[in-house]
Amino acid sequence: MAEGLHESDVKNPVLRWIDQRLPVISMVQREYGTFPTPRNFNYLWTFGGLAMVTLMIMIVTGVVLSMQYAAHTSLAFDSVERIMRDVNYGWLLRYTHANGASMFFIVVYIHIWRNLNYGSYKTPRELLFMIGVVLFILMMATAFLGYVLPWGQMSFWGATVITNLFSAIPLVGESIVTWLWGGFSVDNPTLNRFFSLHFLLPFVITGVVFLHVAALHITGSNNPLGIEPKGPQDTIPFHPYYTIKDSVGIVAYLLVFAILVFFMPNFLGHPDNYIPANPLVTPAHIVPEWYFLPFYAILRAVPNKLGGVAMMGGALIVLFFLPWLDSSPVRSMRFRPIAKWAFYLFTINFLVLLWVGGKPAEPPYIAIARVCTAYYFAYFLVILPLLSKLERPLPLPESISRAVLPRSPGGGPLPAGATANPMEKA
């Protein structure tokens, strides 16, 4: 083989010629073919792949929609209606994109829940988790910018309320708001800026996803037991085992996605956004999209504007410090009986915040939001650090294989194809 060429195992001569000069095929085979993966994954580990599938759907539909959208305050609402009525399959593109945002957040929330439940943020995966939090924040920014583009009532007033929050920042707050608006109110410059950023950020997210996946393939995946593989007996190749398993999950996910798009396209939206934006008419109840409601509830739980903004930002920032706040050597909540129930209560607490965030800012909802906000921060800042020191975890399995494979009479895992009962072959 000529000097400087990559040594390729590809059989096809044309593909081998390419792979010797640009070893993309070898890289894919190494990272997604023979890559050793813990043998005990459940379907919660499919949601990372589902997030990547949804990101691709959002980018494709978003690029096509941008060809028909007019980023001008006098044209935006009508251009969206034209997409729905006159553009070939425009209704499908628009409903897929709009509901895709909700599906994206559902998938990512479950993905984060799995990370918290199985301790996937602990050594050596701290940076992997932190990059994931950055992705979540970028998603939230992109979704907020996109919600403004239809220029309906909730788009306009949502943009007005949320951008005004920056005015609470001392010294520079008013300047930030003016810069975001491009003037002294939410108007045409604001819509242009939001459209440009909404188009750009998905490609930034794609770049950060590559960093996220690269970090994952360096440290390897966590697993439901939260213990590291002890050898080849604890792992299996990613392909074909998990490519097939993920394919089943993707098909089921796309089926749910299709049901939402074709049968309930407006189920997760707000009816006020089908009314053109009117700066002179304030909606009776201004709410963001459902996936922002937990953080909106935290914002409203604090009577002081600056305090509310700080608490809402802190609800995200605290996630960056989670690997050090929870110092327990045991990862999975399966082996931490007290922490497990505290985490389940945290899950219920988060869902209550989501419910309260969509309610009016009046009793008893404000009181409920304050209690739930207190537990949200107490879980990360008090409960997990204390349990890390005081809780006595359950014994961990010796290895993944001994925990998940059938046992031989001697107690060890059976070889592939063997059976624990010698009479079964007979």
Image (spheres, grey):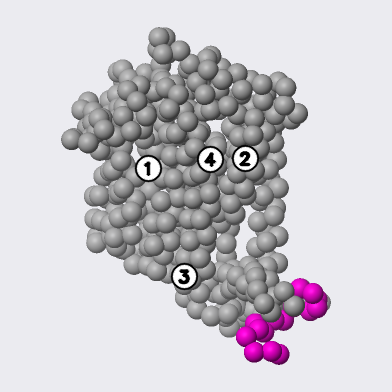
Q: Is residue 67 magenta?
A: no
Where is residue 219 shown, x and y percent of the image? 46, 70
Q: Which mark is residue 63?
A: 2
Does label 1 or label 4 sit earlier along the sequence? 4
Residue at label 1?
Answer: 345
Magenta residues (range): 1-15
SS type, badge 3: helix
- In front of the other: 256 or 192: 192
Q: Amino acid at mark 3?
A: Thr
Residue at label 4?
Answer: 199
Q: Residue at x 52, y 60 (%)?
A: 210
Mark in front: 2 vs 1: 2
Q: Residue at x 48, y 71 (%)?
A: 218
Residue at label 3?
Answer: 219
Mark in front: 2 vs 3: 2
Where is residue 334 shown, x and y percent of the image? 44, 58
SS type, badge 2: helix
Q: Residue at x 75, y 28 (%)?
A: 88
SS type, badge 1: helix
> Label 3: few (<14), some or many (≥20) within 10 Å?
some
What is the C-alpha distance between the residues marked 2 and 3?
34 Å
Q: Amino acid at mark 2?
A: Val
What is the C-alpha distance between the residues marked 1 and 4?
38 Å
| 273 left or right of 121 in image | right
Q: Is residue 9 magenta?
A: yes
| 307 left or right of 402 in image | left
Which quadrant of the figure has residue 131?
Answer: bottom left
Mark in front: 1 vs 3: 3
Where is residue 238 shown, x and y percent of the image? 63, 68
Identify the image quadrant of the C terminus: bottom right
Mark in front: 4 vs 3: 4
